[in-house]
Amino acid sequence: MLPTQPGAVPRPVIVLDFGAQYAQLIARRIRESRVYSLILPYDTPLQQILALRPQGIVLSGGPASVCEPGALLVDPALFDAGVPVLGICYGMQLMAHLLGGRTAAVEQREYGRTRLFVDDGSDLFAGLEPRLICWMSHGDSVAELPPGFAALAHTDSSPVAAMADRSRRLYGLQFHPEVSHTPWGIEVLRNFLYGICGCDPSWTMVSFIDRSVTLIQEQVGRGRALCALSGGVDSATAAALVHRAIGDQLTCIFVDHGLLRKGEPEQVVKTFRDAFQVPLIHVDARARFLAHLAGVTDPEQKRRTIGEEFVRVFEEEAQRLGAIEYLVQGTLYPDVIESGTRTAARIKTHHNVGGLPERMRLRLVEPFRDLFKDEVREVARQLGLPDRMIVRHPFPGPGLAIRIMGEVTAERLEPLRSADAIILEELREAGLALEIWQAFGVLLPVRTVGVMGDARTYGQVIVVRAVTSEDGMTADWARLPEEVLEAVASRITREVPGVTRVVYDITSKPPATIEWE
């Protein structure tokens, strides 16, 4: 689907997803190795898989057990197709199960950091130490090897922690090489990609841009398109890429829905008009969005309401401009995953995916639908976007609406907007803004007693949320210095009327999400 050179289509390494949240992380690690990867549902027909001419196939982990009725399966002919296969956790157990081995529940579940002993240091474990630490998370294991397989590694509890049938280039790992807790795991993946699959590490964002320009030109033809510009790196980069492809056939629309951060509408318009020579229409829809959100308290309904209203505004502008057929969005792969797929549970509906109305007059152009945030940032650099736009903290399309617990009103937006600005200002002042993936405030639907000026107060609560992350799929709470937290809390309670208390969220993702709604 994407080229290693203009006009060429690379042969992908396909990740078959068995419902694991780590499936996209596997694909990301493969791409970090400069090999194109593509995620498909586990039940994709074998003929469709082979039609893509994959260089290798990875079977992901998953929450199910091959020992249970209705286990998720693949066509056993996959293993005789002549394509190298790597099974990870559930994928390894499934391989053993389908090829004549035996998978069974373990007496002692392995979870977390585990000692790994390498018994065969060739191919898959080439260049690695014989004693390693890996990350395990499983309740089943391979009890008997399938015919033709040999054990490559073991742990204290699992006699088969890795296995191989080299004659058919079939490999299995009980541990997770894709997670950072297996620090040498990327080397195992690269041994599989380069040494076993014969992949050429040549897939880059430069090649992505070349191919995407061609695909956009083929899709849009002589038609005209609108780009939903929010000011974030995703939509701005999508606008730059599509403009490279179709030039003045593109018009950008910035919709101010009244849910943006302090000073952001003015900043977005100025930055974009200074950086690009692309027509930009600024639509003030603040009153309209607030009217539709009146009385809405359910987070999913908020997202759906905002998503649909965005599309309706774009459709009205398209009709006003005339002959507009396409809508460009900066949708990312994590948006798609978290909104729910056939193999991944819905975590939250993203306004630009599951929040879209079923019937739309505009056809979507989504060049980044299969990319992660860090890949889009690299595309932005290649396209020459300014650094201040590239390193901007992610900001959700629904904006402050999903950072206000309960109903969204103009009166509740103002204290949150002011508190949010203080948080970002203090991080920049401390030189920490670039180290943090995302930082913001949340307004709770409760009041708390306080004391100000020797008098009792009964004010609002602001939650400070700051996390570190690589791609937004997982995140850890940021260990901000105490003096920074103190400055944030002091300024918010002093400068934001009606706020009595400030608290700090120290929950990672998972189990929480980054946003509160």
Image: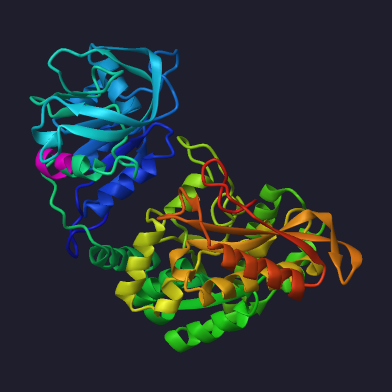
In the image shown, does 165 or 191 lie closer to the viewer? Answer: 191
Q: Report which quarter residue 123 is drawn in.
A: top left
In the image shown, does 480 or 400 lie closer to the viewer? Answer: 480
In the image shown, does 420 or 241 lie closer to the viewer? Answer: 420
Q: Report which quarter residue 185 is drawn in.
A: top left
Above or below, 355 relative to 411: above
Above or below, 515 relative to 6: above
Residue 357 lies, in percent from the top left, at 62, 53
243 with respect to 59 (left or right):
right
| Most frequent secondary structure within the magenta stretch | helix
Q: Residue at the far right: name it.
A: 455
Residue at left offset 31%, top offset 27%:
91
Q: Is residue 481 magenta?
A: no
* Extent of the magenta region: 191-196
Residue at left offset 29%, top offset 48%:
29
218 with respect to 86 (left or right):
right
Total numbered labels placed on residues in the image: 0
5 with respect to 16 (left or right):
left
Can the viewer see residue 223 in this picture?
A: no
Residue at left offset 24%, top offset 29%:
116
Residue 303 lies, in percent from the top left, at 65, 54
Can the viewer see residue 161 in this picture?
A: yes
Residue 42 lies, in percent from the top left, at 36, 31
Residue at left offset 33%, top offset 73%:
381
Residue 429 lies, in percent from the top left, at 53, 77
Above or below, 54 relative to 364: above
Q: Colour scheme in the image?
A: rainbow
In the image shown, does 141 or 212 lie closer to the viewer? Answer: 141
